[in-house]
Image (cartoon, helix red, strand yellow):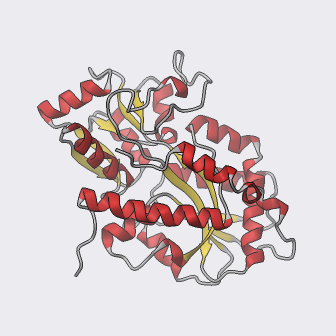
Amino acid sequence: MKLGTSRRSVLLGAAMAPAILAPGARAQRGWEPMRPVQFIIPAGTGGGADQMARVIQGIVSKHGLMKQPMVVVNKAGGAGAEGFLEAKGARGNPHMLVITLSNLFATPLATGVPFNWKDLTPVTMMALDEFVLWVKADSPWKTVADVIAAAKDQRLKLGGTGSKQEDQIIAAAITKSSGAPFTYVPFRGGGEVAVQLVGGHIDATVNNPIEAVTHWRSGALRPLCVFDDKRLAGTEKMTDTQSWSDIPTCKEQGLDVDYLMLRGIFMPAGVKPEQVAFYEGLMAKVRETPEWKELIQQGAFNTTTLTGDAFRAWLTKEDERHKTLMQEAGFLAQPS
């Protein structure tokens, strides 16, 4: 079951529009922020979006990439609707950024909140994030087949971020593909999900790599498969014995499910082209720093980046795909 845009198709789209991959080349110098920039995270603390935003904030500050400070604010209420609606209401404000995940699509579809990605201005795709099926390292389950068999026997508890969001979409797809039922347990953020798994309060998760890597390296968690159509690229050893590339795909393990998640930067609607260009250039500089490259390596991110029309085309396609996925899962908000 294809849940995510394949790495091959996204990279192909990027290759077809090489000009958009160098936003700094056309950034205009006539505008820069005149006061602190609010950086909204429509998700909880400790998760992948939170970690990425705070790394970006640190890079901008450390390397003096912007004269004004960047102020990170978590607005996770309503599965991120709190943050999205604030940005929607800030039309024309060039001193606000939003880092998005795929709740950009899922939240309005699941809740009926009056918001769409077109209510914002796309700036750049920073990366695509992966999902991994994790269990405790001391659990008896060594393969995906072990987990599926156990779930059919005792209905395991599968933890994830939010309700009717990316993690639960994957959980529903696992059940549809394998026939194994799970009790889905939602939490506010990926950091909390990982802690709950380490503590034995849930049986498995579908966390992003960056949300669980610390616990993997400490020996507390075991990755079983990655929800992508090919293995992760990282070959550096993350533990004594394993690198990211050693984790098989779920399809290799007999589970035909894949899903990639957006990590993108947006502004409110109604901003000027030179203001968008400033932040395109800023994020291009961020991507060149060693701190960013370390984050990408530690979190096993897919490094695809898009801006401009290519990014808008990708967003349009993803929005339609999420409508289909959520309809299949029964997650669409019912008309009032």
Nearer to the camera, 302 or 223: 302
Residue 265 position, x and y percent, is 61, 62
Residue in the picture at 44% in, 72% down: 82
Q: Nearer the viewer, residue 296 or 61?
A: 296
Residue 15 vertical position relative to residue 316 in the rendered view, above or below = above
- In this view, the residue farthest toward the top is 241
Q: Looking at the rendering, in which quadrant would you find the C terminus?
A: bottom left
- Quarter occupied by residue 111: bottom left
Residue 226 in view of the camera: yes
Q: Is residue 77 above or below residue 230?
A: below
x, y percentage for residue 89?
A: 52, 83
Tell me residue 125's x, y (percent): 62, 57
Left or right: where does residue 109 sit relative to residue 208? left
Residue 109 horizontal/vertical position (percent): 35, 69
Residue, far left: 153
Identified at 32% across, 29% down, the residue is 254
The image quarter in which residue 200 lies? top left
Q: Please identify the quadrant where the N terminus is shown.
A: top left
Is residue 35 visible to us here? Answer: no
